[in-house]
Amino acid sequence: MRLEELKKGLWGYRKDVVFQYISQQEEQFTQKMAEKDAQLDRMRQQDQARIQELEQENRALKEELTRLRAQQDQISQAILDARSSAEALRAESRAKEEEARETVRQALERDLAELAGYREQITALRQAIQTALERMGQQAGEMEQQAEELFEATPQRNLTLFQ
């Protein structure tokens, strides 16, 4: 019903029609208010669901952040451990290298000492051979001289006497 449809009486609008109009308007308003309340309830429920969803997502992201931070700490610790292990390996490697150098140096010194001993033996042997050769030369000279003396002492002309 519209305001134009209201019936007029002698003194203006009829009360029953006005009351009917007001009641109809109140009914429409109540219905619209109920629809608005229902719509607001749906929106509130949707908003509550969205809030819960966002809170759950927020919790999940916080857990993920905590997990990633822990993982980052583990990676940092692993890097520090790797650095210290590398330094320890370098130190151990240097020590072994130094030990190997010392072993090689000692072996070289032993070998050089042994070589010096051989050199002395060779020198002594050379001197002994030289001395022996000199003696042999002297003996050979003496034998040549004796052979010469024997040759000259042998009778060469008349060997018929011994026949």
Image: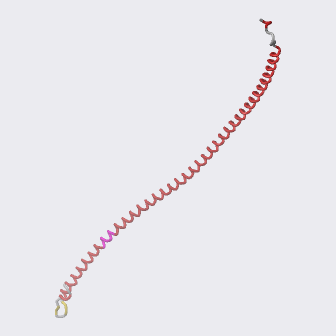
Look at the picture and state if 137 lies above or below 97: above
Which sits in the foreground, 48 or 68? 68
Residue at x-position 21% and y-position 82%: 24
Query: In which quadrant is the C terminus drawn?
Result: top right
**According to the image, what is the colour scheme of the structure?**
secondary structure
Taking 21 as reference, is 54 above or below it?
Answer: above
Q: Is residue 65 above or below residue 19?
A: above
Position of residue 81 measured from the top left corner of the image (x, y, whole percent): 54, 52
Foreground of the two, 3 or 27: 3
Side of 84 where 102 appears, left or right:
right
Q: Going by the image, does 131 lie left or right of 55? A: right
Q: Quadrant of residue 106?
A: top right
Residue occupying the point 74% across, 30% down: 126
Q: Residue at x 37, y 67 (%)?
A: 51
Spot the residue most to the bottom.
Answer: 10
Residue at 81% x, 12% y: name it.
Answer: 157
Q: Main secondary structure of the magenta part?
A: helix
Asked whether 152 falls inside the magenta stretch, the response is no
Q: Any magenta on residue 41?
A: yes
- Nearer-the-camera pick, 145 or 130: 145
Tell me where residue 87 appears, x and y as whole percent. 58, 50
Which portion, as a residue range, is magenta?
Answer: 40-46
